[in-house]
Amino acid sequence: MSKKIDAAHRALVNALNEHARLVSNKSSKPRKVERAGAELRAAIKVYAALVAARTGTASPFADLADPRLDQPTIASLRAERDALAQQRARQEAKEAATNS
C-alpha cells in the first residue's frame, strides 16, 4: 500500500470509529455528531481521490446514496453520473486518438 493511501486509510478508519462512537452515545451533542460526520465525509473524499488517482477506478463510495433521498431523485442522480462518465470516456477516447 502506498504511504498516502495508507495514511488516508488510517484517517478514514479513525473518522469512522469516532463517528460510530458519537452516534452510539445517546448523550452526544448533535453538533459533535455533525462535526464527526463532516470529518468522516472529508476522510472518504481524500481516500477515494487517492485511490482513483492511483488506480484510475471509480470511487468505491460512488454508489452510496443518502438515505433521505427518494428513489426518483436517486435514479436521476445515477443517470446524470452515468451520462457524465460516458461523456468523459468519449472525450478521453477522442484525446487518445488525437495523440496517436
Image (cartoon, helix red, strand yellow):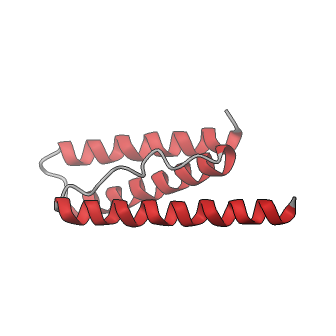
The answer to whether one can see residue 86 in this image is yes
Q: Depth check: 50 or 38 in front?
A: 50
Name the side, left or right, on which 65 lies relative to 42. Answer: left
Q: Depth check: 56 or 41 in front?
A: 56
Q: Residue at x 65, y 43 (%)?
A: 55
- Image quadrant assignment for residue 13: top left
Percent across and percent down for residue 7 are 61, 42
Q: Depth check: 79 or 67 in front?
A: 79
Q: Going by the picture, which residue comes out furthest to the right? A: 100
Q: How many marks?
A: 0
Q: Depth check: 7 or 60 in front?
A: 60
Q: Residue at x 47, y 44 (%)?
A: 60
- Image quadrant assignment for residue 75: bottom left
Q: Quadrant of the N terminus?
A: top right
Q: Residue at x 58, y 54 (%)?
A: 49
- Location of residue 51 with respect to 93 vertically, above or below: above
- Location of residue 54 with respect to 76 vertically, above or below: above
The answer to whether one can see residue 69 in this image is no
Percent across and percent down for residue 64 are 33, 50
Q: Residue at x 34, y 56 (%)?
A: 36
Percent across and percent down for residue 51 are 60, 46
Q: Quadrant of the C terminus?
A: bottom right
Q: Going by the picture, which residue comes out furthest to the top? A: 1
Name the side, left or right, on which 93 lies relative to 30. Answer: right
